[in-house]
Image (cartoon, rainbow, N blue to C red):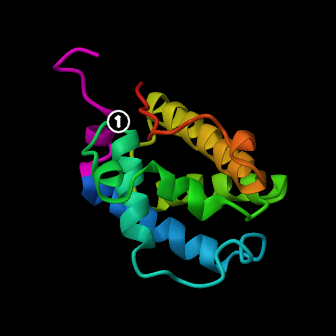
Amino acid sequence: MTDNEETLYDHVGGDEGLHRVEEIFYGKVLADPVLKALFPHRRPHHVEHLTWFTAESLGGPDRFTSELGFRHLVDVHRGLDITDEQRVRFAELYEEALDEAGLPDDEGFRAAFRSHIEFGTRVAQQNSRARTEEELHPLREVPKWRW
């Protein structure tokens, strides 16, 4: 990436754009019957943490890593036993939230974001089913997504 190449984070409007999408998305998962078991109630800092994670993934500040650490992400998914149906529904609702939040709809951005969500949901699913440390996905840092 060159110094003047726009990051995905910049393309979505930074924290403001991401916070908007995460707030909409979180409302959707809390109300969704397929995801209710994974999101039984609103947690006070969930939208903020989702925003931090997504921002860092898309080339923004490293607040998630510096404030929470990647292990936090592993730990919150352990034992959830995410089903294929739940994983797919999570991705669908994220896509809907992008539209509702007014994030860019150009194909380059959407393809990158879909790839990010697909990868992330698979890592979360694997970690949710892991009974031992060895069964965890080997990823141990926030992945960086680019165009």
Q: Residue at the spot x=39%, y=56% of the render?
A: 102
Tell me: 68 left or right of 70.
left
Q: Which residues are magenta?
A: 1-14
Q: In the image, residue 15 lies at what x, y percent?
A: 27, 55
Q: Where's residue 5, x and y in %?
A: 24, 21
How many numbered discs sit on the rendered protein?
1
The percent coordinates of residue 110 (x first, y second) are: 50, 37
Above or below — where is 111 with respect to 43? above
Residue at screen point 43% across, 60% down: 50
Residue 85 lies in what quarter of the image? Answer: bottom right
- The quarter of the image holding the N terminus is top left
Report whether residue 60 is seen: yes
Q: Is residue 12 magenta?
A: yes
Residue 18, image quadrant: bottom left
View extreme (top): residue: 2
- Above or below, 39 against 136 in this view is below
Quadrant the C terminus occupies: top left
Taking 139 as reference, is 125 above or below it? below
Q: Is residue 144 above or below residue 34?
A: above
- Percent from the top left, x then y, of residue 108? 46, 27
Residue under pointer 1: 8
Q: Residue at x 17, y 19 (%)?
A: 3
